[in-house]
Image (tube, rainbow, N blue to C red):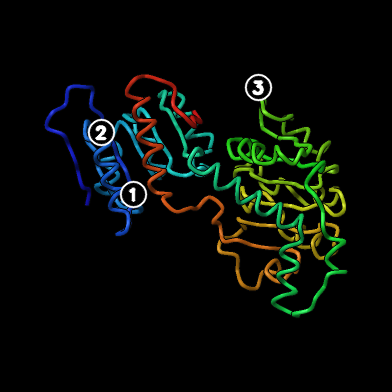
Amino acid sequence: MAITFKSKFMEKQTYKIWCNNSFNADEKVERELLINGTKEHEIYLFKPGENDTSGESKHALHQADIAFGTPDANTLLSCENLKWIHINSAGYSDYDREDLRKKLIERQTILTNSSAVYDEPCAQHLLAMMLSFSRALPFAHQEQRENQLWQKDNLRPRLNLLNGQNAVILGFGSIGRKLAELLKPFQMNLIGIKRTVSGEQPIRVAIQNEVDKYLPKADHIINILPANDETQKFLDAERLGNIKPGAFIYNMGRGSTIDQKALAAGLRSGKIAGAYLDVTDPEPLPPEDPLWQLPNCFITPHIGGSFRREKEAQVKRFLSNLKLFENGEKLVNRIL
């Protein structure tokens, strides 16, 4: 059942805000922050999945001017009143479909995501992965846990410096930009890959169909691609077969963007020196999947964007954009 909050004293234009952003028992402050920040409007709070495609939540979404959270993509097709949709995640693959994009453009409905919330944690997670491989930390930790042997001579050949190495960042968006900032002191040679390139970029950026010129030269392949028809198994067996021997692969995008069987084969042969995966296909990755057992593959359970006070950051990002929306200004992290 929805919880509705409405101020008695409204002078500005008011909006009906639908929200299914979840708040657990420990997140009362964040919930109150949202309620207080929208007190000039009407806000209807639902739990995620609570009648999202039928009943009260669906009816409220059809009446709303603004949606915040994870609204059902199919329902959005018939929501004629929506002026702005704000997704509470950085990923928006459920909404990256031609029929929905067409409808939203026709209605001039704005679509934004929460990339600004997640670019820093994701970039730091990727940097941690890259540094750990560079200094052979995961392999040293394996020796500590499994053999308790002083493998100095075996580990020394694995040690590298990031300085001067080549890295390709697939899906160069806000996370890639933040990672490029963090990598700047290491003086690496960075190439960003985007679907389209426009405006000034902090590093050299190439369009997506030029990627095969750069992958074979990369010491590090950093995948931040979203899931859509164009990126399905983007790193397929052919591309993985053509990469530089000894390269490292990182996936912070979506598991479906890599051919995991081909990845496992490359890791097993040693041509791919190592892989760090924060996302897999499927999720959770089944215990019997061979990637779990490969000694040069390291997996984190889709936690790259997570951090303490994450929910507070989501709410603050939405409220910040709400102020811009009220004033008719350009919104942050706009997709459409």
Q: What mark, if any, has residue 52 been given in the picture?
A: 1
Estimate how packed mark 1 is, as few (under 14), some (14 to 19) or many (20 or more) residues with alpha carbons within 10 Å.
many
**Left or right of 23 on screen, residue 220:** right
Which structural element holds mark 2?
strand
Please state which amino acid type lies under the numbered disc 1. Answer: Asp
Mark 3 lies on a secondary structure that is loop
Task: Left or right? Give the position of 192 relative to 301.
Answer: right
x, y percent for residue 109: 41, 27
Left or right relative to 253: residue 61 = left
Dot 3 crowding, Cα within 10 Å, few <14, some 14–19, many 20+: few
Name the image quarter holding residue 277.
bottom right
Question: Residue 200 got which mark?
Answer: 3
**1 or 3: tag closer to the N-terminus:** 1
Crowd tier of the residue under label 2, counting other residues whose Cα lies within 10 Å: few below 14, some 14–19, many 20 or above: many
Q: CA distance from mark 1 to mark 3?
A: 40 Å
Residue at x-position 71% and y-position 70%:
141
- Mark 1 against mark 3, which lies toward the viewer? 3
Closer to us: 321 or 113: 321
Picture coordinates of residue 322, whole percent (x, y): 35, 30
Residue that label 2 marks: 16
